[in-house]
Image (cartoon, grey):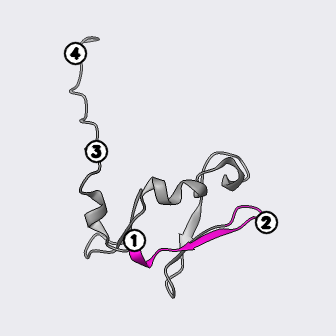
Amino acid sequence: MVINGSTRVDDAFILPYKDFRDFFTLEFLDKRGRRWSGYIRADDEAIRLSPCKKRHERLAHEYHNAFHLLQDAPLPLPKEPPSDEFI
């Protein structure tokens, strides 16, 4: 997952699933059970999920602007061309 903080300068966190998979469990979904929500603290670059009364956090400074981690990532799926099947 890439969390981008700016459109003008490099300010992104590259979070490999293998390192953060424990964040994406059912126990950390929001109250509606639909999404994960969290934030990155600016002072120490800790990523924190805190739905309800549970909390999970990890320091993430080593993932800040770590674009080298994307080198072996699969390419995004190409957009499908518009279909004229129903025209």
Q: In this view, does 14 lie to the left or right of 39?
A: left
Magenta residue span:
50-62
Spatial separation of the CA atoms under disc 2 and disc 1: 26 Å
- The reply to whether discs 3 and 4 touch (Cβ–Cβ < 8 Å) is no
Q: Which residue is drawn at 40% across and 76% down?
A: 62
Establish if 84 lies above or below 60.
above
Q: Which of marks 4 and 1 is in front?
A: 1
**Residue 50 badge:** none
Outermost residue toward the bottom in this view = 43
Between discs 2 and 4, the one toward the N terminus: 2
Question: Separation of disc 3 and disc 4 at Cα?
Answer: 29 Å
Whole-Å distance between the Cαs marked 2 and 3?
Answer: 36 Å
Residue at image mark 1: 63
Residue occupying the point 33% across, 72% down? 6
Proximity of marks 4 and 1: CB atoms separated by less than 8 Å: no
Q: Looking at the picture, how far across and down is residue 36, in whole percent? A: 60, 55
Residue denoted by label 2? 53
Q: Earlier in the sequence, mark 3 or mark 4?
A: 3
Q: Which label was assigned to residue 84? A: 4
The residue wearing badge 3 is: 74
Who is closer to the viewer here, 35 or 25? Answer: 25
Return the x and y of residue 13 as percentages of the image width and height.
39, 68
Viewer-side label of 2, 4: 2
Given the image, on which type of amino acid does mark 1 rest?
Answer: Tyr
Q: What element carries label 3?
A: loop
The amino acid on which the numbered mark 4 sits, given as a three-letter code, is: Asp
Q: Please report whichever mark, 2 or 3, sits nearer to the chain's N-terminal start.
A: 2
Q: Position of residue 68 (x, y in %)?
A: 26, 65
First of labels 2, 1 by sequence position:
2
